[in-house]
Amino acid sequence: MNDHNPYVVARNLLLLMVITGVNDESLAADIALHLWYSAFIPLDYDARIRLVAAKFIRNFTSTPTGARLDWNDGNAVGIVGSISDMTLKLLTSYVRESQPDTNKAHKDRRDIMYVAASLSLCLFSP
C-alpha cells in the first residue's frame, strides 16, 4: 500500500486484519464489506474488528518514524510494513474507543423525530 493518508492506511490495515484474522472466510468477507462500504457497522462486527485489531496492534514494534508490523499466521499469510505514528494512533484509538450506546442513539433519534413531527404540525396547523 502506498497511501499517504493515515485514515486510508488505517482503514486498509483494518481490512487486511479482518480478512486474515477472522477464521470464518465468509464472515471475514462480510465484515470487510461492511467496513469498506457501510456507514453502519453492526455491533457484533465492530466487536470482532476491535478484537482482531487489538491482536495485531500488539505485534507492532516502534521505529523512529512510526511503527513496523511483521506478522504471519504460520502458514502462507503475512502482513509486513511500516506505518506512521498517526496511523498507529488511529488504529489504537479505534480499539480503545468505547462502543456506541445503541439505546441512547435510538432515544436520540426518536426525540429528533418527535421534535420534527411536532414542528411540522405547528407550522401547518390552521
Image: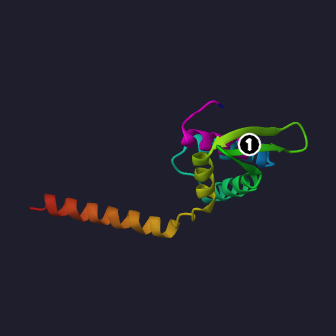
In this rendering, would 79 be left or right of 118? right
State the residue in front, 109 or 71.
Answer: 71
State the residue in front, 121 or 12.
Answer: 12
Residue 86 in the image: above or below residue 98: above
The prevailing secondary structure element of the residues shown in magenta is: helix
Question: Which residue ends up furthest to the top in the rendered image?
Answer: 2
State the residue in front, 109 or 58.
Answer: 58
In this rendering, would 90 be left or right of 125? right
Residue kind at label 1, given as amino acid type: Ile
Which residue in the structure is indicated by mark 1? 19
Q: Where is residue 31 in the image (x, y as percent from the top left)?
A: 66, 47
**Tag 1, which secondary structure?**
helix
Inspect the magenta stretch and tell me whether residue 115 lies in it: no
Residue in the picture at 77% in, 51% down:
59
Residue in the picture at 75% in, 55% down:
58
Question: Which residue ends up furthest to the front in the rendered image?
Answer: 64
Inspect the magenta stretch and tell me whether residue 11 lies in it: yes
Quadrant where the N terminus is found in the figure:
top right
State the residue in front, 70 or 124.
Answer: 70
Residue in the picture at 14% in, 59% down:
123
Range covered by the magenta-colored residues: 2-19
In this rendering, would 52 be left or right of 46? right
Asked which quadrant contains residue 98, the reply is bottom right
